């Protein structure tokens, strides 16, 4: 997850800045929705977009769906059990024990918040999986006029993530070869974190120093403006992508308002 997957798809060919704008519209729409219907429909649209237009394999999409569904569960459960029922005139209590009260209104509120978190994760996942890091950095600098120092800083951060993942795999294999890390339980987990964190931190510092020296040796940042071999242009399909997402988002909100699905006070069977 959260790794660029190269595919000759329509989603991959979009300008990264415009793709970011379109997906930001979806994320912004999810922030104002508290009932499950709106974020649920936005999440469905993101899933279908990545599968149909991003050419992400169906099995890969299913594997991604598991953490997207599991990660928001604690937040949804906490909000469902501790919902403020004083806002409702006649709350529908499902279960009560001690300080915990589960109601249909709380369940809807918790489900809505969980789906909102899932939308944010899916937006990040779709963008990262279908956007080349180099194209993204160039688009930020050329199209959004971000200072190229920040653009290349983002590119370096992109490149460091898979390097750190590979470094962690090497450290884990080295420990297994030496027979280190056989203890179990919570103490074993903390011991593993300590053994992995120190070499990873040392490796990250070493790589960052080498990168900084290489950039200084090439006089990075000496000039105010730079020239680029590749030019990131905005085409009509990029505007169409943003327009489709905006129209779809507005349509979802219109349907929710028309059928009274935009409020967490709506519960099934009422």
Image (cartoon, rainbow, N blue to C red):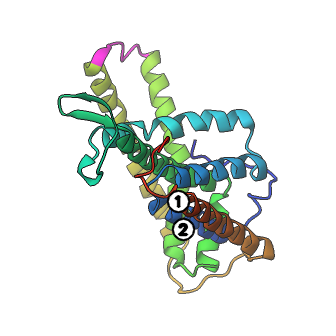
The image shows residue 259, relative to residue 197, as above or below, that is: below
Q: Which range of residues does the magenta coloring cover?
A: 178-185
> Does the magenta run of residues contain 111?
no
Tell me which residue sits at (45%, 30%) in the image: 171
Measured from the top left, where is residue 270 in percent x and y? 47, 45
- Vertical comparison of 131 with 195: above or below: below
Question: Residue beneath label 1, please?
Answer: 156
**Marks 2 & 1, CB-CB < 8 Å contact:** yes
Query: Separation of disc 2 and disc 1 at Cα?
Result: 6 Å
* Residue drawn at point x = 54 percent, y = 55 percent: 38
Instruction: State the residue in front, 61 or 178.
Output: 61
Q: What residue would you read off at disc 2?
A: 152
For the point 17% across and 29% down, which residue is it? Answer: 98
Secondary-structure class at tag 1: helix
**Residue 187 position (above or below residue 152):** above
Look at the image and tell me whether residue 124 can be seen. Answer: no
Q: How many marks?
A: 2
């Amino acid at each position: 997850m959260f790794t660029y997957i190269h595919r000759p798809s329509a989603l991959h060919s979009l300008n990264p800045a415009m793709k970011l704008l379109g997906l930001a519209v979806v994320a912004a729409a999810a922030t104002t929705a508290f009932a499950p219907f709106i974020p649920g429909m936005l999440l469905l649209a993101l899933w279908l977009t990545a599968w149909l237009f991003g050419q992400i394999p169906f099995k890969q999409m299913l594997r991604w769906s598991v953490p997207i569904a599991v990660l928001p569960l604690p937040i949804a459960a906490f909000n469902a059990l501790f919902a403020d029922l004083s806002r409702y005139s006649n709350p529908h209590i499902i279960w009560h024990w001690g300080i915990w009260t589960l109601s249909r209104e709380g369940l809807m509120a918790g489900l809505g918040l969980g789906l909102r978190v899932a939308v944010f994760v899916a937006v990040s996942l779709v963008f990262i999986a279908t956007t080349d890091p180099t194209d993204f950095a160039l688009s930020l600098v050329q199209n959004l006029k971000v200072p190229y120092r920040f653009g290349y800083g983002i590119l370096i951060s992109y490149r460091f993530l898979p390097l750190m993942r590979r470094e962690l795999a090497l450290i884990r294999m080295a420990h297994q070869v030496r027979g280190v890390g056989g203890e179990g339980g919570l103490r074993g987990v903390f011991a593993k974190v300590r053994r992995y964190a120190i070499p990873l931190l040392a490796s990250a510092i070493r790589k960052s120093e080498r990168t900084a020296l290489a950039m200084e040796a090439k006089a990075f940042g000496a000039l105010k403006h730079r020239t680029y071999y590749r030019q990131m242009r905005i085409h009509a399909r990029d505007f169409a992508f943003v327009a489709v997402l905006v129209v779809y988002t507005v349509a979802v909100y219109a349907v929710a308002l028309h059928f009274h699905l935009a409020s967490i006070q709506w519960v099934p069977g009422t």
